[in-house]
Image (cartoon, rainbow, N blue to C red):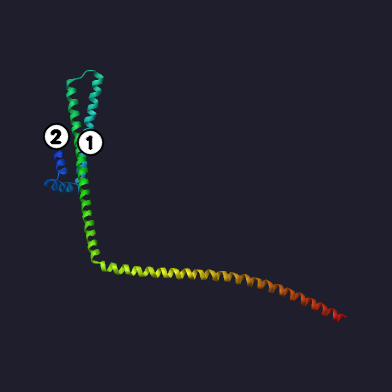
Amino acid sequence: MLQLLYTAIFSEMLLILTLVFKTPLRKLVIISLDRVKRGRGPIVVSTVGATLVVVLSSSLYSMAKIQQRILEAGILNPTDQVLMSNHMLEASLMGFLLFLSLMIDRLHHYIRELRLLRKAMEAIKKQSRSFEDDKNGNTEELKALTEEIATLKSKIKKLESECETKGHEAKSLETEVEAHKKQSEGFLMEYDRLLEDNQSLRSQLQALESSLQSS
């Protein structure tokens, strides 16, 4: 068990060094890790990790039982001491093995992210270069566009001034319309008053006519 743990730890340390330093083996290691993380690879890795966690929990439980036995007896038995040290060594090695596995997974993830970022940066650089080339090749078109923009700006200014004058004229017309409206209202009131006067005069005339006929 201990020899297997030491072998796994040293192999993981070698794998971490291969990932950290840029060597010809680094690409092969990354490709192999990519293949491991595809298909049934994650299931196998999760199973191995769960097994290690279970064995680690068993070692910790055995250590707790030995510690309880020592506290109850009050005497340190050589056999318990050997078992305690063995379980402690196994638990330490398994914990270190799990930690190294986590480091390998994170290193592989960050290396992949860095590769994707580099590819994206290269694509952006190519796009910027092509844009600069197009920009240098289209200077005449840009000059024509700037001239058209200048003429359009002058036309816009002219139209804005015309709109302002039309707005002032519209405001003056509105004031005139309001004045005419008020004047027409006055005329209507005067017309109503005259109608009332006419009606009263007609009634007076009718009364005079009736009084003359009766006399």
Q: Position of residue 147 (x, y in %)?
A: 32, 69
Comparing 47 with 118, the one in front is 118
Looking at the rendered image, the disc whose residue lies closer to the viewer, 1 or 2, is 2
- Vertical placement of residue 10 versus 194, above or below: above
Q: Quick one: label 1, few (<14), some, or many (20+) residues within 10 Å? A: some
Comparing 146 with 88, the one in front is 146
Comparing 68 with 107, the one in front is 107
- Vertical placement of residue 24 versus 181, above or below: above
Q: Which residue is painted at 20% across and 31% down in the image?
A: 92
Check disc 1 and report the residue beneath it: 53
Give the number of the disc on residue 211: none
Instruction: Please state which amino acid type lies under the numbered disc 2.
Output: Tyr
Q: Within the image, what quadrant is residue 56 found in?
A: top left
Q: Earlier in the sequence, mark 1 or mark 2?
A: 2
User: Which element is circle 1 on?
Assistant: helix
Q: Which residue is painted at 23% across and 30% down in the image?
A: 60
- How many numbered marks are there? 2
Q: Position of residue 37 (x, y in %)?
A: 20, 47
Quadrant (top left, top right, bottom left, bottom right) of the N terminus: top left
Alpha carbon distance from label 1 to label 2: 17 Å
Q: Within the image, what quadrant is residue 45 found in?
A: top left
Quadrant (top left, top right, bottom left, bottom right) of the C terminus: bottom right
Q: Which residue is painted at 17% across and 46% down in the image?
A: 33
- For the residues bearing labels 1 and 2, Cβ distance under 8 angstroms: no
Q: In the rendered view, does 118 fall on the left or right side of 171?
A: left
User: Which element is circle 2 on?
Assistant: helix
Q: Residue furthest right?
A: 215
Instruction: Please state which amino acid type lies under the numbered disc 1.
Output: Val
Q: Position of residue 131 (x, y in %)?
A: 24, 61
Check disc 2 and report the residue beneath it: 6
